[in-house]
Image (cartoon, helix red, strand yellow):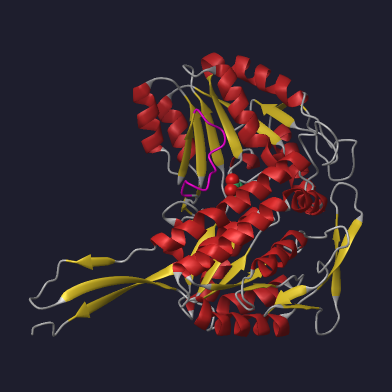
Amino acid sequence: MLDIAAKLNLSNGYVDGDWLSAGDNKTFAVSNPANGDIIAEVADFGTVETEKAIAAAKNAFVDWSKRTAKQRCDIMKAWFRLIMQNQDQLARLLSQEQGKPFAEAKGEIAYGASYIDWFAEEARRNYGDVVPAAKPDTQILVLKQAIGVVAAITPWNFPNAMIARKVAPALAAGCTIVIKPAPDTPLSALALAQLAEEAGIPKGVVNIIPTTQTEAVGTLLTTHPDVAKVSFTGSTNVGRLIMRNGADTVKKLSLELGGNASFIVFDDADIDASVEGALASKFRNSGQTCVCANRIYAQAAIYDEFVEKLAAKVAELKVGDAFEDGVAQGPLINQAAIEKVDRLVEDATTKGASIVTGGEHHDRGELFYTPTILRDITEDADLLVEEIFGPVAPVIKFEDEDEVIAKANASEYGLASYFFARDIGRVWRVAEALETGIVGVNEGITSAVEAPFGGVKQSGIGREGSKYGLDDYVEIKYVLMGGLKK
Ligand code: SIN
């Protein structure tokens, strides 16, 4: 069993099956955002260790990609079981480094593990095709082959699940991987690798680069000729940079980038259900997900009722440390995050919005923000175009369907959207019209391993999870078999 309490192996990076300190012995501190306590000192890897990891992954690819799908499946299933056996410990670690409530962290561990379980099975269904041939005495075969070495650059908001969602399809397809976790939350990544080792994943197949040298390591990972593919979850700005970096070596890319989700409540909606949906969508992980409702639109006839009911629920959300009973909202991840929330709330209120509840720091500590509802937002408020990434819900009034669809779609982002309505014609029209990769109809939480996660427009490229998720990690090879005549 994993001994997180003893911080076993959680201070070194993981390369080629070895737990290593940095060559120059540099380390960095990982702190708990709820109270600022230092919970670990972790090796601060640079480009030397990253080169080693890429070489190890390239070497390991030779064997791993040639194993049968069943062999890869069995090892991944063992990894999945170990993760679930250690769910509580992993969740505790996650809450400590990220701040989310313990119950939510446990949910994340199960969510992340579901990707490993799912793709272990998908490995065995990575079917090719035999296609009716164009010429006599030939056969057209379509093979799916592992892409090669994958670099995964992952965010702090889901320190476990966003790694699992990349490593699982990569390993299932036969790829090997070098993972650079966010510097705020490297411990969950190292714990996952420890269990991968215990499950029998061969050395070099999974490598972890904890680092604060984000630019140097990120540039190396995204330009290195031996890295065939980059999978990134994070901001659209960094996504653009990764595309530029990858251009010279024509890297395959999976990009899960920023969002600006609209959440629309029509006047025929079940208002209580829409309030629950908004609460779940907006305040999950204290508003720090790419699919969190960012702009809530309520139709004029039900606007006041919706705002009032939502504000009453939001005022009841318990804010505090991850391990306190009943806590629903943790701290924001760091100082920059809370400053951004401050700036956006101040901008909105200066321009005319009013605060229904919250609108200020919470007395639990430096990084805690009181869950907030803003109403009467003006069109020029910055939070309508920027991702808030905090527990602040602006509610905007609208008059009719065409107007709200135009407003919802007036964004460079296209990750997720939500709406609540009962009229069947409207449900179909709006679902089709919204320019996002994910649409929740009468639901505030859409994420599930069975469903394709990903955005359109500048929210990204590719899909994670589902039966489509493996496609991002394979190359399609066409083989024309000729000379078949006797
Ligand atoms: C994200 O915020 O990037 C992921 C959210 C999810 O998987 O639901």
Q: Is the magenta stretch mostly helix, strand or loop?
A: loop
From which residue to which does the magenta span run? Answer: 442-452
Q: Which corner quadrant holds the N terminus?
A: bottom right
Q: Position of residue 390 (x, y in %)?
A: 71, 42
Can residue 384 be seen in this snapshot?
yes
Q: Which image quadrant is residue 207 in?
A: bottom right
Q: Which image quadrant is residue 231 in?
A: bottom right
427 or 210: which is nearer to us?
210
Residue drawn at (55%, 15%), measured in percent from left and top? Answer: 302
217 or 147: which is nearer to us?
147
- Left or right side of 44 for 61: left
Q: In this view, does 31 lie above or below 47?
A: above
Residue drawn at (90%, 42%), measured in percent from left and top? Answer: 365
Q: In this view, does 16 lie above or below 382?
A: below
Q: Which corner quadrant holds the C terminus?
A: bottom left
Residue drawn at (77%, 61%), measured in percent from left and top? Answer: 187
